[in-house]
Image (cartoon, grey):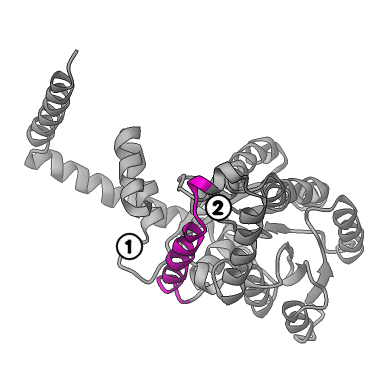
Amino acid sequence: MSWAVVYGLQAGMVGVGLLALYFALSIPTLLCLATLGMLYYGYTKARRKAAGTLPLDDKTVLITGCDTGIGHALAKYLHERGCHVIATVFRPEGQGATALRDVKSERMTVLPLDVSSDDSVAECLRHVKGICANSGLWGVVNNAGHNFVGDVELTTMRQYLLVANINIYGMVKTTRAFLPLLRQTRGRIVNVTSIKGQISRPLNAAYNITKYGGETFSEITRMEMRQFGVKVSIIEPGHFGGVTGCINKDGIARIRREFDEMWAEASDEVKEVFSRDHFDKIMSEIEADAGRSHPTLTPVVKAISDALFSGDPDYRYIVDGSNQLLDKDPMLVRVKPFLSDRLFDALVSYFYL
């Protein structure tokens, strides 16, 4: 069969589809759809209002990854609203940990935690049990993560494993360790994944693998914990990279070091395909993208707070970022169910290749 026939059939499918849409969208149909949309909006607002908000002042919440970014901002936000915060940090003597200790409050506890280390998780659990002996542990926010950029072929296996040990297995270790305490309070687990947990992008294989894994792990944990009254929510931030450690000044410097490691370990055959300029081009795009980030972390922090303290939290919070009219990744996730795989891949390629 010739390609002319294939293209002709393709055009025919598009044409018939457009005709079907034209005839289906009559005025009564549009009115019904608009009414349905308004009813659903009213229903969700009424449901959330009826569920109310739980008090914060008698709750203790543990947050991972509070050195910088979302974790650091969330620790301060919850503390200011009366919550007892256990802020865990990877660098106990770093600037982020010091700033949190400088709050000098009985409701702010700073503990070291390397989520990729079994011993570190066990030691943190021991401290938390002592802190929560009377109040119990209400929530765990799995926020610790490692952003990563790199081609499938250039990313080293050490880098793949490093990202996975933090982003997905760190989440698993922390959740498993603290579940007994959360069952006692019928509390909350909030897992910060990424909008990239629903959309695959070039140069993000090592990172996206872990974020898709975080989505699946969260959904299964939610179903298994329902019988114990423990609720699990997923937070999917869009483009906030410029105000986190992902692609700020320090993040960009780290990415450069990771690119140097990739190039040093690349085989001669791979170096013939990817020139050293390939990394420079990616860095230019990352630096430009940093300027398109949302200017604050407030939308993400508020979404996490809602997941922790709403009487009826959502299963999934897509949090639009970017300082542009549209945040591309959340937009793509929302249209994906209505597009074929080929068309969706073409759309992603248009934006990112």
Whichever of labels 2 and 1 marks the residue nearer the N terminus, that label is: 2
Q: Amino acid at mark 1?
A: Leu
Q: Position of residue 328 (x, y in %)?
A: 36, 57
**85 over 161 or under it: above or below:** below
Residue found at x 40% / y 54%: 330
Foreground disc of the pair 2, 1: 2
For label 1, the residue is 326
**Does the magenta portion include 287?**
yes
Q: Say which of 336 and 38 sits in front.
A: 336
Please tell me how crowded label 2 is: few (under 14), some (14-19), or many (20+) other residues with Cα within 10 Å.
many
**67 over 278 or under it: above or below:** below
Q: Write down the quadrant of residue 66 in the picture.
A: bottom right
Residue found at x 53% / y 63%: 303
- Name the disc covering residue 273, or none: none
* Residue stretch in magenta: 272-295
**348 over 290 or under it: above or below:** above
For label 2, the residue is 150
**Does the magenta portion include 99?**
no
Secondary structure of the residue carrying tag 1 is loop
**Relative to 260, 104 lies left or right:** right
Q: Position of residue 152 (x, y in %)?
A: 55, 44
Look at the magenta stretch and give its main secondary structure.
helix
Q: Say which of 40 and 78 sits in front.
A: 78
Q: Amino acid at mark 2?
A: Gly
**322 over 219 or under it: above or below:** below
